[in-house]
Each structure stands twice: as structure tokens, then as C-alpha cells.
Image (cartoon, helix red, strand yellow):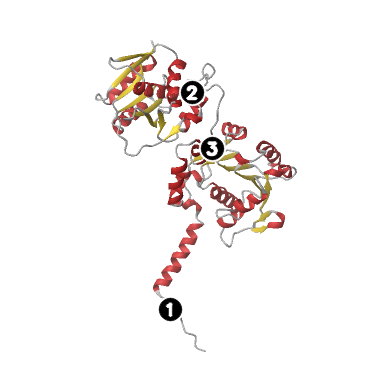
Amino acid sequence: MHIHSYQAPESLILLKKHNHLSQNRRFNWAELARPNQLPPPGEWQNWLILAGRGFGKTRTGAETIRAWINQGLYKRVALIGQTIDEVRSVMIEGESGLLNVHTDYERPKFESAKGRLIWKNNAIATMYGADHYEKLRGPQFDLAWIDELAKFRHPQKTWDQLMLGLRLGDNPRTIITTTPRPIPLIETLVKDPATVLTKGSTFDNQENLAKTFVKQIVKQFEGTRLGAQELYAEILTEKQGALWKRSIIHHHDPVNPSWLRVVIAIDPAITHHEQSDETGIIVAALSKDQKAYVLEDLSGKYSPAEWGRRVVKAYHKHKADRVVAEVNQGGDMVKSIIHSLDPTTSYKAVRASRGKITRAEPIAALYEQGRVYHSKPFTDLETQLCEYIPGITAKSPDRMDALVWALTDLLLAKKGGEVINLWE
């Protein structure tokens, strides 16, 4: 028998090679993942991923489980969603679920009737619905993946039962993937030193989302409270007695703006060490319709030289009109440092004759009147604003102070003179 040898066309060979490479790349998570989708280093118990819709939370959870099980690090895993059906449809069978992130060879066996996955190395992941959290009583685990914790009907009871069972191995851990809501458990986890927090927005994954989807969600939700929560993963907490509430902070980034004035306000830390306060640095602009826009929050813990360089850089980037600082809060030092870096920088000293509360109240009122916008969500600044309770908040809110000075200069301050004396 003569067997004819078949020579495939070059185009077909290239196509098969491309398909093979594409398939391999699909399962190469280390190459595909963004840095904030990879497990953080260090010793931690809880990895809390608070991220907007479409960020890739499910893929992150599934790929981490896959990697750790294939490495033999974990053997007994709890998969917890609001319901068993959601665990199955999202965490296991979903497009980014556990079955679809594995290659054909390594894919675990799904025993649907028993509600579990079994890997070739005998690792087992079991499904649990938070609506029946009592079923977590008894089983033991060394790893748990919780999806959309913030929407559970009984989040604390589910968490408590899980913690009692998370007792196997040398380093039991939880991965929590959720869009945030202001529930007590989320707030507790964020503050827990055993938690590593990863924040992310819908737009981190924009290149993998349909353009029509991105366009529609921006049109529908940008600048809204729901958008801040569902797209930017903001925890929209409200505190009794706070001057600012989430409902009065509006987000809007104007297209091709033409600013009347741009200022940079700085509230410098007096010391520079690990326990020092932050230096507040806020860039704000005034539009032709007499509305103020917060353009950047550059605040942080810096040495005087570091915050000086940041201020000068922002001054030129935004073509600012001047830098504003309070003279009785390091104001003379600010002028000296700024002018040592760039003598051409315009500088204005301001002095308050009344306390922080009196200075902040009229600015909060401007937010209520719809005269102030944030060009995008500024997580740390907005949290500080919404947690500031006059007479109760002990720590000096440095970002808020800088914001108040910037908006006062744009919307409330008197004209003329080197020093502006406010509310005499």
C-alpha cells in the first residue's frame, strides 16, 4: 500500500501554529494579568478585591485558585456565592470560571450532583450558597473564594461560619472578589491588618470590554453615586453629622475645558517621619460658568523637597495661576521651598481668623449647591470629606484642608493684597 504524504498549505500551517500559540497564551495568566490581578506578596490572610463591574474579578479569583491548587499549596477549598446556582453559573461554569481557566489536561472533574470539583492531585473545591450559610458548619478548609460578598443577605453569619472552618494547613487564606457596598463586614475587612486590599475600576479592563458597553455606562452612570460604587468601587458610607455626604459629591470631567483660573493649594505636614501627617495638595480650576472643578489630588507623605517638586510640576502641567498656602501652617516655608525650585511660580499666602469648621462649612454648602465637581473619583479625598465630623474627628484632614483653601480662593476669597484674611 502506498501512503500519500500530505503537505499542508503554508497558510494552514501558520494558522494552526497561531491557534496553538493563542491557546497557550490564553492559559498564561502571568502574561495576561494586570499587576493588580496577581496575588500580593507578604503574609496576609484575606485578599479583598474591591473592583468595579467588568474589572476581571472572577477571572482573578479563578486563576489564583487554579495556580495554587496546581502548585499543591491548597487541598480543600470553599467556593461561596450568594446561592449555589450563582457559584455554578459564575465561579465554576462561567466564561471566566474555574472550568474555563484550566487547560483540557488539567481541568478538574465537576461532580455537579455532589457540588464539588476534584483535581487530579485530589484537591477538592466544594460549593456553598450564603443563603444557607449553616452548611459551612462542620467542614474544614485551607482556602476559600468568596464572590460578591457585599450582596449576601447574611454576610456576617456566613463569614463567621467560614472562619470557624478555615483551620487546615499552615496558611489558610480567603480571596474575596466583590463590587463594594457599605456593609459593616466590608468596612471591618478593609481595616483588618490581616487583609490586603486591591482596588480597581471598570476602566482598568477597558481594552477587553465592548466599546459600546463602555460608552453606555459612561453616559448612564458617570458622575452618579451608583457609578462611583459600581464602576469605581467606592464604598459609599455616610456618617451622621459629617459636613459632606456622598450624595453631594458629583463627578464630571469636562471636554476641552477653558478655565478662568487654576490654583494649587497645599497644606504641608510640619514633620517628616513615619507618623507624620500627610501633605495635602489639591489642584482646582474655575470654569466660565463659575463652577469649580477638582482636577487632581496629589496629597501624600512627602519630605518638603518631594512635595515642593510635585507642586511645581503640577503648576506647569496645569498652567496654574498661583499656589496657595496658609501662612500660620507652614506658609512661609511653602513660599521658600517653592521659590527655591522655581522663582517664577506665583504664590499667595492666606490666613484664617477662624477655625477649621467655619472654613469648611461654606465649601460644603457649595457642594450642596452643585457648584463643585470632581473630575473623577478621588477615593482618599472623598473618604476624608465624608468622614469629617466637626468637633469629633480628631486627626487633621489634610486633603480636606487643602481642598478648602483651593475652593475658597476660587469662589469665596476677596481680591487684592498678598494675604487674604477670611471670615473676619
User: What amino acid type is highlighted by mark number 1?
Assistant: Gln
Residue at x 63% of width, y 48% of height: 74
Q: Does dot 2 land on a helix, a strand or a loop? A: loop
Image position, residue 101 (x, y; %): 55, 55
> Which residue is labeled 2 in the image?
275
Camera sees residue 278: no
User: What amino acid type is highlighted by mark number 2?
Assistant: Gln
Image position, residue 44 (x, y; %): 58, 38
Task: Say few, some or many: other residues with alpha carbon within 10 Å of mark 3 (under 14 / 14 to 19 / 20 or more).
Answer: some
Q: Is residue 405 above or below residue 144?
A: above
- Which is in the foreground here, disc 3 or disc 1? 3
Q: Earlier in the sequence, mark 1 or mark 2?
A: 1
Residue at x 42% of width, y 24% of height: 366
Q: Which quadrant would the C terminus be assigned to in this image?
A: top left
The image's mark for residue 379 is none
Image position, residue 52 (x, y; %): 51, 42
Q: Earlier in the sequence, mark 3 or mark 1?
A: 1
Determine the image quadrant of residue 372: top left
Q: Does dot 1 land on a helix, a strand or a loop? A: loop
The image's mark for residue 7 is 1
